[in-house]
Each structure stands twice: as structure tokens, then as C-alpha cells.
Image: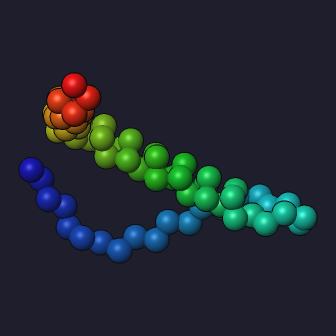
């Protein structure tokens, strides 16, 4: 398992807001999009570990369902 250094990172996600509505929902969607991209990049960088984790998850779910 590779361990990376701990760093503080600030992510900013902007979205257009309507003057009549609060931009809270649009901002949350933008933040989720950024997190989705980051998690996908992380999974692609560690392909073997990602597939192994998915396989373990699938096996666990199979045991829990039946």
C-alpha cells in the first residue's frame, strides 16, 4: 500500500446563481462534481488496488444478500 503525504488542499467550486434563488444547491452539485473527478483520478492511478477493492466489496455483498 502506498502512503502519500498529508497536505491541506482547498478546493473551490463555482456555479452561477440566480438572483431569485439561493445558490446552495448549485454549489453542492459543483462540489460533488469536483469530488467525483478527484475520486476517479485516484482510482485510475491505482487500477489494481481499485479492482481488488471492488471485488472484495462485491464478494461481501454477495454473502450479505443470500
Determine the residue located farthest toward the left in the rendered image: 1
The structure residue drawn at horizontal position 14% and vertical position 59%, both measured from the top left corner, is: 3
State left or right for residue 18 relative to residue 45. right
Whether residue 19 is visible: yes
Residue 51 at what x, y percent from top left? 21, 31
Coloration of the structure image: rainbow
State left or right for residue 33 relative to residue 14. left
Residue 12 at what x, y percent from top left? 56, 66
Determine the residue located farthest toward the front in the rendered image: 66
Nearest the eye: 50 or 65: 65
The structure residue drawn at horizontal position 79% and vertical position 66%, both measured from the top left corner, is: 22
Name the quadrant containing residue 40.
top left
Name the quadrant containing residue 49.
top left
Determine the residue located farthest toward the right in the rendered image: 20
Q: Is residue 33 above or below residue 65?
A: below
Name the quadrant containing residue 20.
bottom right
Q: Is residue 60 above or below residue 12?
A: above
The quadrant of the picture occupied by the C terminus is top left
The structure residue drawn at horizontal position 84% and vertical position 63%, both measured from the top left corner, is: 21
So how many labels did they put on this image?
Answer: 0
Residue 37 at what x, y percent from top left? 46, 46
Nearest the eye: 42 or 65: 65
State left or right for residue 31 relative to residue 2. right
Residue 43 at what x, y percent from top left? 30, 41
Whether residue 47 is visible: no
The structure residue drawn at horizontal position 35% and vertical position 74%, both measured from the top left corner, is: 8
Nearest the eye: 3 or 31: 31
Amino acid at each position: 500500500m502506498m502512503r502519500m503525504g498529508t497536505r491541506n488542499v482547498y478546493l473551490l467550486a463555482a456555479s452561477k446563481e440566480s438572483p431569485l434563488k439561493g445558490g446552495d444547491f448549485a454549489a453542492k452539485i459543483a462540489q460533488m462534481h469536483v469530488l467525483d473527478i478527484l475520486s476517479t483520478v485516484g482510482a485510475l492511478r491505482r487500477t489494481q488496488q481499485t479492482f481488488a477493492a471492488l471485488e472484495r466489496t462485491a464478494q461481501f455483498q454477495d454473502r450479505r444478500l443470500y
